[in-house]
Amino acid sequence: MPQRRRFILAIETSCDDSCVALIDTETGEILCNKISSQISQHAKFGGVVPEIASRSHLAQLPILVKSCFEEFDLRFSDLSEIAVTSAPGLIGSLLVGVSFAKSLAWSLKIPLIPVDHIEAHILSPLIDCKNLQFPFLSLVASGGHTHLFHVESIGKYQLLGKTLDDAIGEAYDKTAKILGFQYPGGPVIDKIAASTKEKGYAFPIPMQKKKTLNFSLSGLKTAVKNKALELEVYEEKGLLKNMDEFYANENPKKMKRKEKIIQGFQNTIEEMVLEKIQLALKKKPLKNICISGGVAANQGLRKSISSL
């Protein structure tokens, strides 16, 4: 009788998405990958509400795990380990995921593997780029994190710089909220910046005169807010809308002002990131650059970094 395949059950609840995956222990093949998005629950608030996120994880995790097992006719005895995001992230969300994983591992008497959220981002390019050579420069850019690492090998990372205040993804979402857009605002800013022909307003590049690899976004957020107030397009306190509603109902003059703010913000972020990467490469002459995290999907950033 052939031996049944064994799997790792992976659980991720560091923010607002509940995620479950099954990975073959021998081949590394991802058999199942299910995500329950909470975007519709947080959209009207302009950002993730931690209490709502935690309660949603509590409801969704058992459903996702059951769905994976039923779809592939698996049993709990087919699991060899359980892996779970342990930190960093929203404390309530992490608590739900870790408690669920810990309880299940204890009941099955199998190992529990804590996974560092940032390390997972650093190594995620290896999923698609299996021939990626070490060492490389890694920019982790997400809603909660902005870190620049010299990655020497698996488990060996040198932190070169990080944000001193807000993360890049948070700055994108906040800029969108200032202009009246729903969460998640980052993709909205990205799409509008990529499509508009308006010339962007000039914003100061954060920490440009300081030769440091650290980032700072709070000043840029303030500059965006001040410009929105000056141009009378500050709408953070009003009814937030999605991009379709923006183009269907927005006053043309206000639309152009917002597009110029968005383009200017996007240009400033690109310049800031390129300056940091170029400075890092002077200190660490590496051949490969990786960007991971949600902000890695940004078209402007991808194009700018690819130009290097």
Image (cartoon, helix red, strand yellow):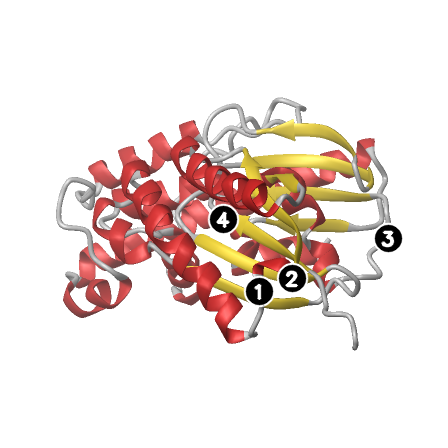
Q: Nearer the viewer, mark 2 or mark 3?
A: 2
* Distance (Cα) linking label 4 and label 1: 51 Å
Q: Mark 4 is on which residue type?
A: Asn
Q: Are marks 2 and 1 in contact (CB under 8 Å)?
A: yes
Secondary structure of the residue carrying tag 2 is: helix
Is residue 237 left or right of 66 when viewed as pictured? left
Q: Residues within 10 Å of mark 3 (few under 14, many from 20)?
A: few
Q: Residue 163 at what x, y percent from top left?
A: 55, 29
Task: Point out the image quarter for the N terminus.
Answer: bottom right
The answer, for residue 131, to whether it is visible in the render is yes
Q: Residues within 10 Å of mark 2 (few under 14, many from 20)?
A: some
Q: Mark 2 is on which residue type?
A: Asp
Is residue 128 left or right of 174 when viewed as pictured? right
Q: Residue 259 at what x, y percent from top left?
A: 32, 56
User: What is the quadrant of residue 21 in the picture?
Assistant: bottom right
Residue situated furthest bottom in the rendering:
1
* Distance (Cα) linking label 1 and label 3: 37 Å
User: What is the quadrant of residue 284 in the picture?
Assistant: top right
Secondary structure of the residue carrying tag 4 is: helix
Mark linked to residue 133: 3
Closer to the N terminus: mark 2 or mark 3?
2
Closer to the N terminus: mark 4 or mark 1?
1
What residue sits right under mark 2 in the picture? 78
Q: Residue at x 58, y 44 (%)?
A: 105
Q: Residue at x 38, y 64 (%)?
A: 196
